[in-house]
Image (cartoon, rainbow, N blue to C red):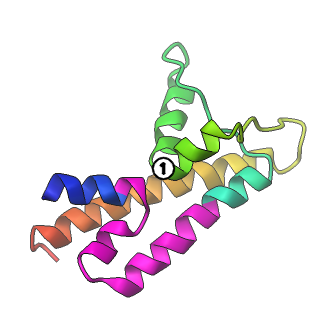
Amino acid sequence: MLVLLCLASWAVPGAGHLWLGRRAKGLMFLVALPLMFVIGLAVSGRLFPFDPREPLVALAALADLGIGATYVVASALGFGHGDVTMVTYEYGNAFIIVAGLLNLLVIIDVCDIALGRK
């Protein structure tokens, strides 16, 4: 059950909190984190590729993947190429990366709640 809960929370930000009955937090995460990701894409952010030859790029790709299904859908639709000539490029990258990392923290919070530590 805990694994399914964490997978649901990864795939859809806020799903784990909704599953556990924490509606306010779940809805907040469900709206805020994908919105942050979309804003990052809208201001020319980049979805980083997995390139083990460049460790920082690979870490950024793992952080991007933290947002779950939102990343998969955006990648499949061809979004996130980024435009390095745009003034907002680095801001977009930061929004996308932070959205993924925040979702990973949300998953940890769900695990803590499910295990009774919160």
Write the residue at 15% across / 69% down.
114
Residue 32, position as x, y percentages in the image? 56, 71
Decide if residue 27 is on the left or right side of residue 90: left
- Count of numbered tags: 1
Q: Is residue 90 left or right of residue 110?
A: right
| Residue extending furthest toward the bottom | 24
Reply yes or no: does residue 45 show up in magenta.
no
Front-most of residues 99 and 3:
3
Residue 13 lies, with reference to residue 48, above or below; the image says below
21 within the magenta span: yes
- Going 40% across and 69% down the picture, which residue do you hit? 14
Q: Residues within 10 Å of mark 1 (few under 14, many from 20)?
A: some
Task: Please name the predominant secondary structure of the magenta segment in the image.
Answer: helix
Up-down relation of residue 28 to residue 61 (above or below): below
Q: Give the answer, above or below, for where 109 lies relative to 100.
A: below
Quadrant holding the N terminus: bottom left
Give the quadrant of the C terminus: bottom left
**Taking 11 as reference, is 88 left or right?**
right
Does dot 1 land on a helix, a strand or a loop? helix
Pinpoint residue 115: horizontal percent, then vertical percent: 10, 67
The answer to whether 62 appears left or right of 39 in the picture is: left
The residue beneath circle 1 is 69
Whether 23 is drawn above or below 8: the answer is: below
Q: Which residues are magenta?
A: 10-36
- Tell me what residue is drawn at x 73 percent, y 45 percent: 45
User: Residue sitting at 54 percent across and 54 percent down?
Assistant: 98
x, y percent for residue 84: 83, 35
- Give, as a three-letter code, the residue at label 1: Ala
